[in-house]
Image: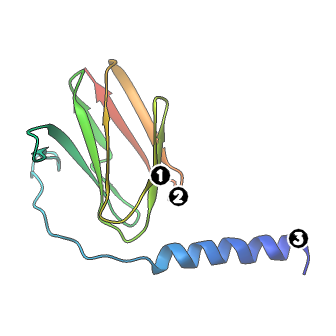
């Protein structure tokens, strides 16, 4: 098989593995205004939540204050990996989270390198 054929098979295999991963949505309600909820973990820390699903980021744009923390929640069915100018989430498995505290004002764009989804965090 030639190199081009092997590359096509590799891409199809990776896509198949990604599509075969699954999970159940836990049905957490989101705020009707902006689809984010300030959440607290057991330590009293508050977050602005962004939900990662199949091929959606909800919401894909949020506005927060300097020093706020965003938590991305992967509800599946595939892994995600978010890259921004000042963060790299590493692989976020299904039902796992990633948090990042934004210390500088401005527009912070990010990309999921697994799904090619894009989002923006605006820090005021």
Mark 2 Cα-neighbour bin, 10 Å: few <14, some 14–19, many ≥20: some
Identify whether 76 is placed above or below 16.
Answer: above
Point out the tag, 3 or 1, that comes first from the N-terminus. 3
How far apart in space, not on screen, are marks 3 and 1 (Cα)?
27 Å
How far apart in space, not on screen, are marks 2 and 3 (Cα)?
23 Å
* Secondary-structure class at tag 2: loop
16 vs 99, left or right, is right
In the picture, the quarter occupied by the C terminus is: top left
| Residue underneath mark 3 | 3
Identify whether 101 is placed above or below 11.
Answer: above
* Secondary-structure class at tag 1: strand
23 vs 28, left or right, is right
Residue at horizontal 26%, vertical 39%?
70
Where, by quadrant of the figure, is residue 71 drawn? top left
Point out the tag, 2 or 3, that comes first from the N-terminus. 3
* Secondary-structure class at tag 3: helix
Foreground mark, 3 or 1, reads: 1
Residue at horizontal 24%, vertical 34%?
69
How far apart in space, not on screen, are marks 2 and 1 (Cα)?
6 Å
Residue 120 rendering spot, x and y as whole percentages: 37, 37
Residue 98 rendering spot, x and y as whole percentages: 33, 47
Residue at horizontal 43%, vertical 35%?
109
| Residue underneath mark 2 | 114
Residue 65 rendering spot, x and y as whole percentages: 20, 24
| Residue underneath mark 1 | 81
**Residues under numbered marks 3 and 1 in contact, where contact means CB atoms less than 8 Å apart:** no
**Residues under numbered marks 2 and 1 in contact, where contact means CB atoms less than 8 Å apart:** yes
């Amino acid at each position: 098989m030639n190199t081009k054929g092997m590359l096509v098979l590799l891409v199809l295999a990776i896509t198949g593995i990604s599509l075969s991963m699954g999970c159940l949505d836990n049905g957490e309600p989101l705020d009707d205004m902006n689809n984010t909820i300030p959440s607290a973990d057991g330590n009293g820390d508050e977050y602005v939540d962004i939900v990662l699903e199949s091929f959606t980021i909800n919401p894909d744009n949020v506005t927060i204050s300097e020093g706020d923390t965003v938590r991305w929640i992967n509800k599946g069915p595939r892994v995600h990996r978010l890259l921004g100018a000042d963060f790299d989430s590493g692989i976020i498995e299904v039902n796992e989270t990633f948090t990042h505290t934004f210390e500088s004002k401005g527009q912070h764009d990010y990309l999921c390198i697994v799904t090619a989804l894009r989002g923006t965090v605006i820090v005021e």
